[in-house]
Image: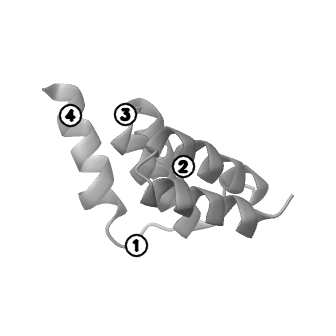
Amino acid sequence: SSIKAFEFLGYLREREQKFNDAAANYDDAWKLSRMRNPAIGYKLAYNLLKCKRLFDCIEVCHHVLKLYPTYPKIKKEIMDKARMSIRS
């Protein structure tokens, strides 16, 4: 199984706005990359946010930020939005 293949499948599902399927594909890619590829983590978190799996989304964001504290946009564009959705 190829990380790139799962990532591409996730991209295709995302373009079709099938965010649950995209999240599943990105999750497979994320696990195959041993949760060390921040770009895949970002895409996974984004799709989890879109399908309202907010706690999973925040968990992925924390993992990415733990390894890459300066990774751009993930905190402001994804994690903060997920937190606001939980509060409302």
Q: Marks 4 and 2, how far apart in space? A: 21 Å
Residue at image location 53% in from the left, 51% down from the top: 63
Left or right of residue 84, residue 72 in this image = right
**Amino acid marked by disc 3:** Leu
Q: Are marks 3 and 1 in contact (CB under 8 Å)?
A: no
Mark 1 packing: few (<14 Cα in 10 Å), some, or many (20+)?
few
Q: In this view of the protein, which residue sits in the foreground, 26 or 75?
A: 26
Residue ID for mark 3? 54
x and y percentages locating residue 35 in the rendered image: 67, 55
Residue ID for mark 4? 85
Q: Determine whether 13 is above or below 88 in the image.
A: below
Q: How is the image coloured?
A: one colour
Q: Are marks 1 and 2 in contact (CB under 8 Å)?
A: no
Left or right of residue 76, residue 56 in this image = right
First of labels 4, 3 by sequence position: 3
**Amino acid marked by disc 1:** Thr
Question: Image quadrant of residue 34?
Answer: bottom right
**Amino acid marked by disc 4:** Ser
Q: Are marks 4 and 1 in contact (CB under 8 Å)?
A: no
Mark 4 or mark 2, whichever is nearer to me = 2
x and y percentages locating residue 57 in the rendered image: 43, 41
First of labels 2, 3 by sequence position: 2
First of labels 4, 2 by sequence position: 2
Q: Quadrant of the N terminus?
A: bottom right
Residue ID for mark 1? 70
x and y percentages locating residue 78 in the rendered image: 31, 53
First of labels 1, 2 by sequence position: 2
Residue ID for mark 2? 22
**Amino acid marked by disc 2:** Ala
Question: Image quadrant of residue 75?
Answer: bottom left
